[in-house]
Image (cartoon, helix red, strand yellow):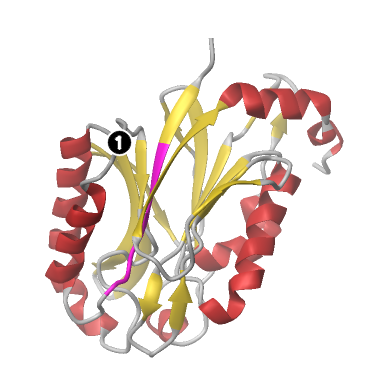
Amino acid sequence: MHELYKICLVQADVDFKDIQKNLNNYRTLLQPINQQPDLIVFPEMFSCGFSDILPDIVSDIQDKSLDFLKEISQTYNCSVVATMPIQENDKIFNRLFWIDNTRILLEYNKSHLFFGVEKQCFTKGLSRQTCQHKTWNFLPLTCYDMRFPQWCRNQWNESTQKMLYDCLIFSTNFPSARSKVFDILSSARAIENQSFVISVNRVGLDGFGVAHNGKSKIIDPSGRILAEMPANEQGILEYTLDKDHLERFRNLVPIYKDWDK
């Protein structure tokens, strides 16, 4: 019996000045969903984007954004993944949440912070963690993490004969100017970790006037693009992952057995 997992990627423009507008836009974009998803994935900083005012509006973002994610999870009876700024005492984190109905299954603070406002104002996370959902194991990471192969690294457990994860998720804000890098890194992480990769990116201008062209995609362990969204368009991408596809490839090309420890 095939172990299938239904993914919905949301590619959207994000207005750094209007959180409620962004949340309403997501509600509209999700309306055409054709099949019951297991997971909906949003871009990095899904409700606010990046801007120089970001550190001053964190308190306005947190509750609204978390409530929205729980609402969407309950509405579509599925898990959701998204990142947002979270303030704890005097520290601000770029925190990824995995939410299933009202339960938070995972919280991950972005480890690799990008130059500029993120590096100046945010605190880096120190650990990563996988999330098991249904029969699948995922490693969810955030944007700039994609550039660091060791941080993304899958692991083969000889004693259990199992891989650490089946699918690597990247929630991103990758600029159009580095679109080719986004494509190459997404495929490279899939190939070297022998896993599916889901890369979700935004479109439009952020608060610094930097353009993003989307091209959110799903990649198989051979590095082949299974599905990709058009550049510079808002919308959703629905795709069903098949674990048989993954296992057949791993058995055919068992490179993971020779990985460096």
Residue 33 visible here: yes
Q: Position of residue 213 (x, y in %)?
A: 47, 72
Amino acid identity at mark 1: Asn
Residue 157 location in percent, x, y?
Answer: 70, 28
State the SS at label 1.
loop
In the image, residue 108 above or below residue 156: below
Residue 122 in view, yes or no: no
Using the image, determine if residue 207 lies above or below residue 99.
below
Please state the horizontal and vertical placement of residue 38, each as a whole percent of the image.
35, 32
Most common SS among magenta residues: strand
Assess whether residue 9 is covered by the magenta stretch: yes
* Image quarter (top left, top right, bottom left or bottom right) of the C terminus: top right
Q: Which residue is mark 1?
A: 34
Residue under the image location 51 percent in, 38 percent down: 138
Q: Is residue 1 left or right of residue 248?
A: left
Instruction: Give left or right: position of 161 versus 135.
Output: right
Q: Nearer the viewer, residue 1 or 102?
A: 1
Name which residue lies at 36% across and 82% down.
206
Reply above or below: 228 against 102: below
- Is 191 left, or right, of 201 in this rendering? right
Magenta stretch holds residue 147: no
Q: Residue 63's spot in the image, x, y percent? A: 14, 60
What residue sits 45% from the left and 29% below the top? 5
Magenta extent: 7-14
Q: Is residue 164 left or right of residue 103?
A: right
